[in-house]
Image: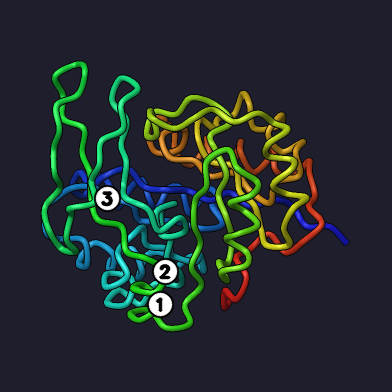
Amino acid sequence: MGRRPLLYAVTEGFSGEGFFRKVAEALEGGVDILQYRDLGKHGRHAEIARRLRAICSDFGVPLAIDDEPWVARQAGADMLHLGIRSLTNTVSLWWSEGEARDCSGIRQGSDMLAFPGHDSRPVLCRHMPSLEEARAVVGNLPIGTSVYCSPVFAVEAQAHGYAYVSVGTPYMSVTKRIATVCSMQNLSEAVRAVRIPVYAVGGVNLKNAAEILETGVSGLVSVSAIFSANDVRGTVRKFIEVLEGFTVDRDPFPVGLVR
């Protein structure tokens, strides 16, 4: 019997008490997984994550932490998400006007490095822990990863023991401006290539959700479509209505997640 795909909400950066209010509204609306992602250098990541852990527990919703295994451990999070560098074991690259910037000199715990972009704004790089580094900190906690426009990477992620893979971006994204846009065929191929859940990430909104779900993905990952909405709770409920029109052929939750 098929299950409906899930809604995986990723936070925007911490912005004060209103941040927690929006999270609570998203959970009330029916979000299935919440990921705390915060590029801010305010030094409060662990504190915020612990508070999110308490809020998520009230709603029975798993909490994931982005790229910070120590924060995940301190907060008692349910899982960890790592960027594509953890899979490829290559240098971190951010793109500016078609030119790759080498960020391999970043040390764990160091500040971000900045390179001038084509529009005079900095192109930022940050350390992303490898799978081995993360596993040494979080133990058997489920770890997911992101891949861009490559079913081959999805297969490799499964072989390395990742609990899920987010593939994108199906549409241009506010939070991933440098990512390559993927075709629906790429998403379908990634779904067919692996047994672990495959989520679509990047530019996901209510207008294109149904088209993306036709590919068979196990869930939709959304940031701004949820947390920038005037009515966060109502927007999530509309997403759930769309999701309920589809079923998937596998457990949509990350492999090994305790629920």
Of labels 1 and 3, the one closer to you: 1
Q: Which residue is mark 1?
A: 135
CB within 8 Å, label 1 to label 2: yes
Q: Secondary structure at mark 2?
A: helix
Exactly how many numbered labels are in the figure? Answer: 3
Looking at the image, is mark 2 or mark 3 earlier in the sequence? 3
Residue 145 placement (x, y as % from top left): 49, 57
**Mark drawn on residue 19:** none
Residue ID at (15%, 47%): 112
User: Residue beneath label 2, please?
Assistant: 131
Looking at this view, name the residue that lies furthest to the top: 119
Secondary element under disc 1, as helix, strand or loop, is: helix
Judge from the rendering whether residue 121 lies leftward or rightward of residue 55; answer left or right: left
Neighbour class for label 1 at 10 Å: few (<14), some, many (≥20)? some
Query: At 32% from the left edge and 77% from the top edge, which residue is drawn?
Result: 73
Q: At label 1, which amino acid type do we have?
A: Arg
Q: Nearer the viewer, mark 2 or mark 3?
A: 2
Q: Amino acid at mark 3?
A: Asp
According to the picture, the residue beneath numbered tag 3 turns out to be 38
Question: In the picture shown, does residue 12 fall above or below 66?
Answer: above
Amino acid type at mark 2 = Leu
